[in-house]
């Protein structure tokens, strides 16, 4: 079976993350090592040998993963080809590998067990309270890049990374806020919200249409949840469910009581009404 050929970028410094490439000249394919390792549906060659990294990826497996990625939209750049999925089983977010880094996704690598995982910012194991099932951890034979090893080797480096990520997030938020303020000054807010409403109406039509393809349906649902607003609305609705249930139970109790009263009323036997003739006879006597 044809294998991808290992190459190193001539412009990257030695050991630089992302400098390792795998190429299939006949198929005109080139892929970063990390893009291959972190792709959710990718499986390394059974002939993998740590002493011979040139045979670790089958061309056919790479082509299959590329085909799978054509229908997956990136949560960060909104373009197709996002083969790197969040490891949280209930999460539908997918990325290109470098988009995951830009979105501050958590990258986990285990050199001993060859485990390569990505968690979206929402499901970062360092921030969440639930724990993923160890039995479902995806394992692959792969070497851990030296750069990631160095970054995670000490607590000091981890703290520096956390502060750097926080600073980058704050900077990105500030840019977005300033941009929206400029849109308001330019009188574009109405146009923006009209466009948002048009997009929501289109999404509603797709979800209501029985002829919508499964892929398009999934992409529409993912887009709605990814925007944040939709998820917040559903969260509010879900949080109010218990209150609504209690209201309906109280209403049912009142209806049951009213039904019981009506049943009792129905069983009451009224005395026969006296006729006018019998009444007159009584008076005469």
Image (spheres, rainbow, N blue to C red):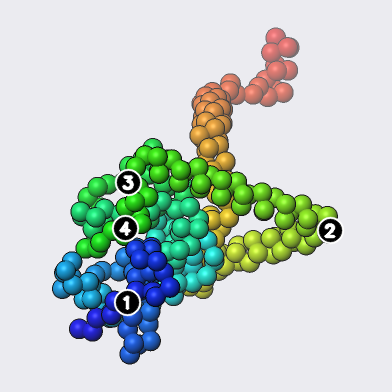
| Label 4 sits on residue | 146
Q: Residue at x 22, y 50 (%)?
A: 135
- Cα distance in 3D space between marks 3 and 4: 10 Å
Q: Earlier in the sequence, mark 4 or mark 2?
A: 4
Measure the C-alpha gap from mark 4 to mark 2.
Answer: 50 Å
Q: Is residue 23 above or below residue 15?
A: below
Mark closer to the chain start, 1 or 4:
1
Q: What residue did someone put label 3 on?
A: 153
- The quarter holding residue 24 reads bottom left
For the C terminus, give its image quadrant: top right
Instruction: Identify residue for label 2.
Output: 187
264 in relation to 55, above or below: above
Foreground pick, 170 / 241 = 170
Give the mark nearest the N terminus, 3 or 2.
Answer: 3
> Residue at 30% of width from left, 69% of height from top?
42
Marks 1/3: CA distance? 27 Å
Report the Cα–Cα distance between label 2 and label 1. Answer: 52 Å
Residue 62 in the image, given as x and y percentages of width and height: 32, 76
């Amino acid at each position: 079976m044809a294998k991808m050929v290992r190459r190193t970028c001539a412009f990257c410094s030695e050991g630089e993350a992302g400098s390792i490439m795998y190429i299939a000249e006949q198929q005109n394919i080139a892929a970063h090592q990390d893009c291959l390792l972190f792709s959710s549906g990718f499986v390394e060659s059974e002939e993998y040998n740590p002493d011979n990294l040139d045979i670790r990826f089958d061309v056919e497996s790479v082509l299959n993963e590329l085909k799978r990625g054509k229908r997956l939209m990136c949560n960060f750049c909104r373009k197709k080809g996002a083969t790197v999925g969040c490891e949280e089983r209930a999460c539908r977010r997918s990325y290109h590998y470098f988009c995951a880094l830009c979105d501050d996704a958590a990258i986990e690598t285990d050199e001993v067990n060859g485990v390569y995982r990505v968690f979206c910012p929402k499901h970062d194991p360092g921030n969440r309270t639930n724990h993923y099932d160890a039995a479902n951890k995806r394992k692959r034979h792969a070497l851990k890049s030296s750069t990631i090893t160095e970054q995670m080797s000490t607590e000091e480096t981890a703290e520096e990374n956390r502060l750097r990520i926080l600073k980058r997030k704050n900077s990105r938020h500030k840019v977005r806020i300033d941009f929206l303020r400029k849109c308001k000054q330019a009188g574009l807010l109405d146009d923006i919200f009209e466009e948002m409403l048009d997009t929501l109406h289109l999404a509603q039509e797709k979800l209501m249409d029985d002829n919508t393809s499964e892929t398009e349906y999934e992409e529409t649902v993912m887009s709605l949840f990814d925007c944040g607003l939709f998820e917040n609305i559903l969260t509010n609705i879900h949080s109010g469910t218990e209150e609504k249930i209690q209201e309906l139970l109280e209403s049912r109790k009142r209806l049951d009581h009213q039904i019981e009263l009506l049943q009792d009323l129905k069983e009451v036997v009224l005395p026969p009404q006296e006729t006018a003739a019998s009444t007159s006879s009584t008076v005469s006597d």
